[in-house]
Amino acid sequence: MYVPARGPGGPTTPGTLLEVTGLRVVADGALSGPEVVLDGVDLRVAPGECIGVVGESGSGKSLAVRAVVGLLPDGTRTDGGSVRLRDQEILDLPPAARQARRGRGVALLMQNPFTMLHPQLTCGSQIADGLRPGAPGGPAVSGRRVRRAAERAEVARRLAEVGLAPETADRYPHELSGGMRQRVAVAAALAGDPDLLIADEPTTALDAANQRAVLGLLRRLQAGRGMGLVLITHDLRVAFSACDRVYVLYAGAVLEQGSPAELESDPRHPYTAGLLAAEPSVHERLPRLPAIAGSVPAPGRRPDGCPFADRCPHAAPVCATPGVLLRPLPHVPAPAAEGHQRLSACVRLAEIADRPGALKGGAPLPAAGPAKAAPADGAPAPVSGDPAVRTAAAPVPALLLEGVYRTFRSGAVRQAAARGVSLTVPQGRVTALVGESGSGKTTLARIAVGLETFDEGRVEVGGVALAPGRRPGHGERVRLAGQAQIVFQDPYSSLPPLRTVEATMREALAAAGQIRGASRRERAEWTRDRIGELLTQTGLPAGCATRRPAALSGGERQRVAVARALAVRPRLLVCDEVVSALDVSVQAQLLNLLTDLQRAEGFAVLFITHDLGVARQIADEVAVMYRGELVEQGAAADVLDRPRHAWTRRMLAALPPAAVGRPGPAIGPLGPGEQPLQ
Amino acid sequence: MTPPRSPGPGPANRPAPQRPWHVRLGAALPLRYVLRRLAGTAGLLAVLSAAVFALLRVAPGDPARTLLGTRSATPQALAAVRADHHLDDPVAEQYGRWLADALHGRLGTSIRTGQDVTAVLGDRLALSAQLVLLGFAVAVALGLPLGVLAGLRARRPADRAVQSLAVVTLSTPVFAGGLVLIYVFSLMLGWLPAYGPGSGGGGDRLLHLVLPAATLGLSVTAVLVKLTRAAVVRELAREHVTFALARGIPTRRVLIRYVLRGTVVPVSTGIGLVLAYLLAGTVMVEQVFALPGLGQLLVGSVTFKDVPVVQAEALLIAALVCLANLTTDLVHPLADPRLRTAAATAPADRDKGQA
């Protein structure tokens, strides 16, 4: 099956810190027998090098690093391949020997700062747990008190290294912000002074300012300590901004490898090209995002041969030949430095590389469709003909907020989520509401659909006025449901897991009192037809109706959530971070879908997002929220190209720079010890 | 609690010395919280005492006749009882007087024996307390280690064996289990006495309590096993356990400091509930093993409609259960710092979760 790739440099170079060759991981399914999750993954890290492993969910990137540290989750196991740490094979070592290597040889930093630290232990003690015994005070130290004091001093030093005050040692994780927790976690992971740090999505759970700060911190520590760093991420921009070399992983196999600059300007695999193209840009609005069709196949359903063949616009019969082969590029100039050769697994590279633009970002992939009704970038008027007519006929805005205040109180703590917000979402237009987490945008979204109360101000949803200080009553709720619907961020928790898709949709129709028909049979028939129509509209197979959410992928679930919201033909669709839980390729599909639906049906959209690129791609108008206040609003192009408010500029500046191999001199908008903006 | 220590030799970033233990205890268990819990418990006890007092009024028939018991209800006797118990006063006044008496340990006289209720209870309280404590020790000593074992070996043979045993003990009624133990250990093997409280000193009493305590303890062991197992399985799957292993903390240390630490809150809640259940369980066990404890007294008093004794016992057991709950409530913030400030940070967290 697998053929190991060897560059011109020959076998293992002596300076290699980590060398993974042909790593296979299988999952033992309860019924289906073993399924190959990772099929021959190669990675190589030199001392002091930072590599990135990029892949969408389901690519197996987390499993690959879990296998390297020997902490695979239950039900999965390694099945061949080799993992060499400092030239020693560690896959064959007994568990105790592997545990002894963790912390010193290799340490793993995980994604979620909210679950990674033990909630009942102080930060200091968790860092101290990982210190090497005898390391801080030397071997001569005796006596409990002296040892404890030395340990405390060492913990304080470690905290200072990640830019935290020594008092943090006595705090519990829940008393700290997400960014600070992630710093504590970094200090804990580095307590044993590992040669290699593997960071699994270390910034995904953080907001943009913290993301950049933590990324910069990792890079600085890595450079200072001369340590190897493996950065796992789903975000190409993050990998490109921080890594020396990037591996692109897809469905359990490495498809391409190269330096960030090379990968970005000259992708040598259709998948990489597709990913790059699907990334929404903050600088221009494309008529359609070139999405990759389909979704990442589950381990049991991968095609033979190239795992990307099913979704690849250039697939040919030869792609089904078993054996994914990662090899040096045929006609690319010789590698500049050892270990920097470009590798690609595409068998048709020689043929398709010659096609003009085949592997460029924004390539005319078949899935992209004809670019019809392309509006001028961000220009206000030409959304589409039909909605414009509706707008003229109905001067009532889809959503009107005037001087809305909302403060959350708990004991002495007061948190203002909305401070005099005035926002109008006109009929048939898409308004994006952008801001950092905690800026109050979700609260506003929930107020707009009557899920959250507001203290004072005026809220009208398509002419239905909501009263401050109380939740809408039953009658109001029914009228509101016909006017405005919401789609939530997490498709994994926003659909009832025990109900079929059909039952969920029927409920939505019934809740707004929209089921038509005289007899029960007529109504059942009407409902079934409407549900079928909605599923087709949202691009879901008809068989979906009888399935439960667990049988659907994340993208499909979010489509169901959109279909549910649109079932009652609302005049306003509130989308609360609807794409932030999705992979880049699926995100592009969903954004295209929303754009299509909006043009066809002419409803208004309030699109909440923290991602300025996404906002640019979908919105006619953009409103920027900061600490409960609207600080700027206007046409999308105006706000994003010519930001007036300092905060908007700061958010734009916090985006990872396009392809710069190294992080810029500025680590982030915040100093290392500074509290993140919250 | 660790003692205060001197500052370390950190040059630039000098760590503050750890605060002394009493300061940390004060932070972990703020006085206001303790007072609030105490007040809550007192309020609960007040409500319970009212309910217990109402027992007499709710009992069918004339309270005076009830209090007379089997004595002949001549008008003179009834009048004497009425005067004695102030039955003609307003109900609130009666309750106030009864409560004041109860607080002073005057719980009236038994209808059945004419003895002072406090004395009757006092005799039996010691035996039942010993029984409950021993049973509790059996349950904890078996339940927690077996639960941890089952959790660590989840879905493997050891786990299945422990779980099967737990199901067997859980589904065996106390009277049947007690009889089986008597049959095996007293009749067949002759190791232990079959019934009675024993005579004389501590050793004999202990010997006599082994089988009853085992019966009582085993009836609730399964609950602790299941609770502990579930807590351990849940903790093992937590990301912070993986992270602890991934940075090279020795496995044993991870197990004790990270995994078991996380199970303290759910398991201590379970222990509090089990303690309440054990108190009720004495009724059956004391019958089976012919132990003259509170449980047996309760059965006798209820059959005999000996209302003052029933009232006193109900009050006592209610107070003990409240006490057990209070203890768990006070242990929780000590074990989990998030519970100390939970009320203050909850909305902020919620908001963050959504954003």
Image: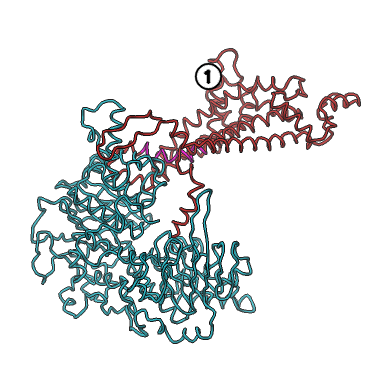
Chain colours: A cyan, B red
Q: Residue at x 14, y 47 (%)?
A: A87
- Asked whether B247 or A378 is in front, the reply is A378
What x and y, as percent, mark residue A528? 53, 75
Q: Residue at x 57, y 27 (%)?
A: B132
Residue B169 in sight in this render = no
Tell me where residue A238 sits by quadrant. bottom left
State which chain disc 1 sits on.
Answer: B
In the rendered image of this protein, does residue B255 appear above or below residue A563? above
Tell me where residue B285 sits by quadrant. top right
Q: Which quarter shows the N terminus of chain A?
A: bottom left
Q: Main secondary structure of the magenta part?
A: helix
- Asked whether A478 or A610 is in front, the reply is A610
- Asked whether A382 or B213 is in front, the reply is A382
Q: From this viewpoint, which residue is outermost toward the right? A: B75
- Asked whether B262 or A450 is in front, the reply is A450
Residue picked out by circle 1: B190
What x and y, as percent, mark residue A413? 50, 50
Amino acid at the residue labelled 1: Gly
What x and y, as percent, mark residue A279? 30, 70
Can residue B264 be found in the magenta stretch?
Answer: yes
Left or right, residue A115 beside residue A90: right
In magenta, the rendered stretch is B255-269
Q: Which quarter shows the C terminus of chain A?
A: bottom left
Left or right, residue B57 beside residue A236: right
In the rendered image of this protein, does residue A554 appear above or below residue B162? below
Q: Residues within 10 Å of mark 1 (few under 14, many from 20)?
A: few
What x and y, as percent, mark residue A149? 30, 32
